[in-house]
Image (cartoon, rainbow, N blue to C red):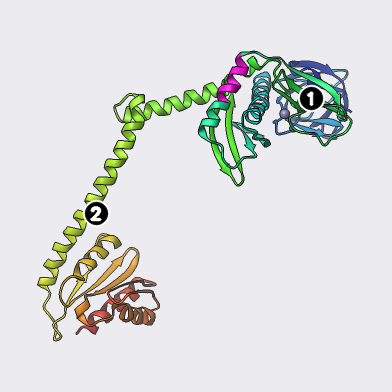
Amino acid sequence: MTHRIYYTDAYTTEFTSTIVERSEDGTRVYLRESAFYPTSGGQPHDLGTIAGIEVTDVVDEEERVAHVLARPLVDVAGDVRGTIDWARRFDHMQQHTGQHLLSAVFEDLFGFKTISVHFGPESATLDLDAEIVTRKQMLVAEERANAIVAEARPVTVSFEDAATATGLRKASDRTGTLRIVTIADADRSACGGTHVRSTAEIGVVLVRGLEKIRQATRVEFLCGQRALRRARRDYETLISIAGALSASIDEAAGLVGAQAERLKESESARKKLAQELAVYRMRERYDAAPPNANGIRVVVIRDAASADELRALAQAALNLPRAVVIGALSNPISVLLAASDDSGINAGQLLKERLTAAGGRGGGGSRLAQGSAPDTAALERIVADLVNAFG
Ligand SMILES: [Zn+2]
């Protein structure tokens, strides 16, 4: 059984211990005591060195803690020295104690229970048993958590019998001795993680956002240096957005909104103009096409820049007397047939027949139909067929 130094002292960064066992290849080592925190309870494992060799993973094997090394540890006589990567560990301590504090505050203020937590490399999250958490509640909780940080309340660890331990935020289903982490006058939680000794050491608690996850709400947060680094990055992003707009960062949001509005307006104006232009262009081609024996003018369009443009031209033709439009596009390989009301032609039916014969697919209504052909040769056959159909 490994004696876990971090259970009673999260601040030990160097220790000496004895190897009690190691794997045959020497890369998995067990010590009599260890300050290395193994991945558990959502908190990631520590990094550091043992006998100068990098520790790449620390595994909780219930009774024992396994240290996975970057290279084999061999020929070690006597004790080995372990060192913990303190920057990483302290960061985890800040996030973890910050999580206990936030969970307690959300429950205390609004009755929202924490149902799960996750500590990621960028930010941490906790899931609240609440379908709706408002932004206002989020900000109130953030403010309250930071007020408790400023009060520098002690965070202590005690070992209590599960049968008699009271006042826990979440009842534990364990029996025997519980390790209880207490934030004075704020929280008591059964937890095996590493924690700071005062809420002051959590540093700033930044709640970044809320996300609805089924019946729960996920709260993203960052504590201490992480919060500062994230805020710095957000600020740099904001500066570059403001710079692109030649505005101050305080004006940026308003300007982005106004520009989006203008973009929408000019897009609809552009669409309107494109439709008007299509009417003129169609009229020109229609006038140039000689009517056939039935008085129908057939316009073949092969130079449309896009399916949208082709469609706009076809729509314009529907308002002209006895007009038929046959359109072909090579990318994507597609064909269009449009016929005005008084042409006596059912575009959907006619195109469908030709498409089916050529191995293509598609269809549409009696006025406008579209389809795709398997290849250019088939497309050419369909177009020629349609042109022939109108003599
Ligand atoms: Zn915990």
Q: Which of the two discs, 1 and 2, sits closer to the camera?
A: 1
Residue 161 lies within the magenta run: no
Q: Say left or right for 22 vs 330.
A: right
Tell me what residue is drawn at x 76 percent, y 23 percent: 181
Residue 148 lies within the magenta run: yes
Which residue is the site of mark 2?
271
In the rendering, which numbered label is found on residue 78?
none
- Tell me, yes or no, if residue 257 can be seen here: yes
Tell me what residue is drawn at x 29 percent, y 75 percent: 380
Residue 290 at x, y = what percent?
A: 11, 78
Ligand 1 image position (quadrant):
top right
Which residue is the site of mark 1?
180
| Main secondary structure found in the magenta portion | helix
Tell me what residue is drawn at x 48 percent, y 23 percent: 232
Question: Splitting the image into 4 quarters, where does residue 89 fall?
Answer: top right
Q: Give the range drawn in magenta.
A: 142-150
Residue 370 higher or lower than 119, as above or below:
below
Q: Looking at this view, name the residue that lies furthest to the bottom.
A: 293
Residue 84 at x, y = what percent?
A: 72, 20
**Which secondary structure lies at badge 1?**
strand
